[in-house]
Structures are given as structure tokens and as C-alpha cells.
Image (cartoon, rainbow, N blue to C red):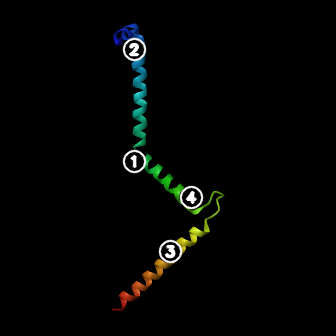
Amino acid sequence: MADKKASSRSEKEIQAELDATRTRLARTVDELTFRVSPAEIKRRQIASLKASANHAAFNEAGEPRLDRLAMVLAGLAGTAIVLGLARRAFNRG
């Protein structure tokens, strides 16, 4: 059955199909090369990080999320206090 189908196509049709397949394959390889390039991976990761940071710090209206900012500032203040106390304790003796 495959022989009948193959024999019914002309040489030009087969060549055109091969050319089309070759072109699709070349585009696919180019796209994969682009996607795995270090510069593109870096660009995507930076864009993702920025989006995550903006989503964490701002609401949908673009206003700052004060509750989250307050928690971050409280954490920083707590860390500073603990480090100051640890420095004082270790420098005494």
C-alpha cells in the first residue's frame, strides 16, 4: 500500500516535501538554539524575578503592600538587633 502511494507522487512533489521538511527542521533547530542560549536564559530569569518581586511588593492596583513591607522591615530590624547583641556578647570576652 505504501508502494502505491509513493509511486503516485512525482519527483517534484517529493522534492518539495523534503524541502519543506528541511526548512521546518532548520527553524526548529534555530528556535531551540535561541531558547537554550545563556543570554536568553538569563533574560527570562531576570524577567521572572522582577515579576515575582513586583507581585510580592505591589497589589493589582499598583499600590504597595504595606503589610508585607512591614514584615520585611520588622525582620530586618530583628536581625540587626540579634547581630548587635551577638557582637556585644562576643566582644566582651
The residue identified by callout 3 is: 75
Q: Which residue is mark 4?
A: 55
Which tag, 4 or 2, sits closer to the chain's start? 2
Vertical placement of residue 26 versus 71, above or below: above
Calculate the distance from the C-alpha at mark 3 to the C-alpha at mark 1: 35 Å
If the image is split into quadrants, where does the C terminus sit? bottom left
Q: Label 2: few (<14), some or many (≥20) within 10 Å?
A: few
Amino acid type assigned to the residue bearing label 1 in the image: Pro
Residue type at tag 3: Gly
Q: Are marks 4 and 1 in contact (CB under 8 Å)?
A: no
Q: Please name the residue shown 41% across and 20% down the image.
A: 19
Q: Earlier in the sequence, mark 4 or mark 3?
A: 4
> Would you place residue 52 above or below residue 38 in this image?
below
**Residue 45 vertical position relative to residue 18 in the rendered view, above or below:** below
Tag 3 and tag 1, C-beta contact below 8 Å = no
Seen at 39% across and 43% down, the residue is 36
State which quadrant residue 2 falls in. Answer: top left
Q: Please indicate whether residue 46 sits to the left or right of residue 89 in the image.
A: right
What is the distance, in whole Å, between disc 2 and disc 3 at their CAs?
69 Å
On the image, numbered disc 2 is attached to which residue?
14
Secondary structure under tag 4 reads: helix
Could you tell me how far apart the alpha carbons at marks 4 and 1 are, in whole angstroms? 26 Å
- What kind of residue is marked 2? Ile
Of callouts 2 and 1, which one flags the residue occurring earlier in the amino acid sequence? 2
Graded by Cα atoms within 10 Å as few (under 14), some (14 to 19) or many (20 or more), the crowding at tag 4 reads some
Label whose residue precedes the other's in the sequence (4 or 1): 1
Q: Label 3 neighbourhood size at 10 Å, few (<14), some (14-19), many (20+)?
A: few
Residue found at x 39% / y 11%: 5
- Amino acid type at mark 4: His
Image x and y of residue 32, in percent = 40, 38
Residue picked out by circle 1: 38
Where is 29 relative to 47, above or below?
above
